[in-house]
Image (cartoon, rainbow, N blue to C red):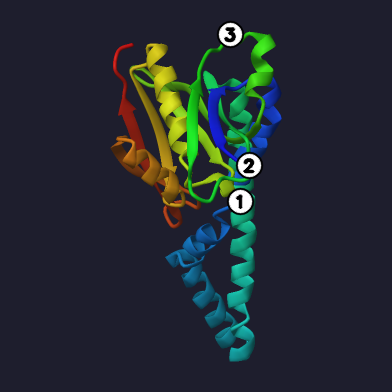
Amino acid sequence: MPCEIIVRFARLKDLQKRRELVQNSYSINFWDAFLFFFFQELTLELCVLGAAVLFIFCGVSAAACAALLPAAAAVVAAAVLLYRYALALKHAQNVSRELYGLVAEAHGSLLPPGNNSLSTRIHLTENEDKSSLSAYHGHIVGTVSVLDFQGASASGWVEGLSVISEWRRHGVGTALTGAARRAAAVRGLQSLECALSHLQPSARRLLHSAGWECRGSYERRLAGAALTLPVLRLGTDLPLA
């Protein structure tokens, strides 16, 4: 069955589905986040220090001290889940205050075709004729938000780029970011900016391949200077519409 992706401006009735997409996207890379934080120097130092204190001062056996490792793993897993839930909730709430949002709708199939034979159509008319909405009815497989960026120039802040896992690597994310760029240029914005962490390699590769440039990098502090998350700032300048 032929499959087509339509990228259009989000409507109010899309809000709940978009929030679900954003929240779910942060649970996909759980294991990457867990391994990253578990093998941080701070985590390993606490395990060694705790085992030494128990063994030397409390007379706990070496075998019992070894149980600190799975206990630490459980604590890290719980912390990652809580952190990613809070982050997902924050981004999902930001959907309500965006400059504009976009969704990608799949038509013709519930799952992407195996041969990647997708056609993409961009539909960016905000004042849609309600009588034509049925022509664009499909199931939402991706979304992105553009918020007002409080910088020195008129820029938009891109966040909440989310694509259902089954539809990744089929050009949906590329279509969404391309449409976001077009809509920003029409609005007279000078650039689009975003920040992506070390735990979002797919999004970073997508934007790099689309020509987004590195604006800089910084460390997001999670537990003071002892536990940080590397973040890359990306941006793309827009032509005058």
Q: Which residue is mark 1?
A: 27
The amino acid type of the residue labelled 1 equals Ser
Labelled pair 2, 3 in contact (Cβ < 8 Å): no
Question: Alpha-carbon distance for marks 1 and 2?
Answer: 7 Å
Q: In this orientation, which residue lies closer to the viewer: 82 or 3?
A: 3
Residue at x 40% of width, y 24% of height: 181
Write the residue at 48% across / 34% down: 119
Read off the residue under disc 3.
Answer: 127
Mark 1 against mark 3, which lies toward the viewer? 3
- Inspect the image, locate mark 2, and give the three-letter code of the amino acid beneath it: Gln
Q: Position of residue 151 (x, y in %)?
A: 37, 21
Q: Amino acid at mark 3?
A: Asn
Instruction: Measure the alpha-carbon separation of dots 2 and 3.
Output: 28 Å
Q: Secondary structure at mark 3?
A: loop
Other residues around mark 2 within 10 Å, as few (<14) / some (14–19) / many (≥20): many
Position of residue 140 relative to residue 197, above or below, is above
Q: Residues within 10 Å of mark 1 (few under 14, many from 20)?
A: some
Q: Is residue 108 left or right of residue 200?
A: right
Q: Is 44 left, or right, of 206 in this rendering? A: right
Q: Residue at x 52, y 57 (%)?
A: 33
Crowdedness near tag 3: few (<14), some (14–19) or many (≥20) residues, C-alpha within 10 Å: few
Q: Which dot, 2 or 3, sits closer to the camera?
A: 3
Name the mark on residue 23.
2
- Tell me the quarter of the image containing the N terminus: top right
> Is disc 1 placed on a helix, strand or loop?
loop
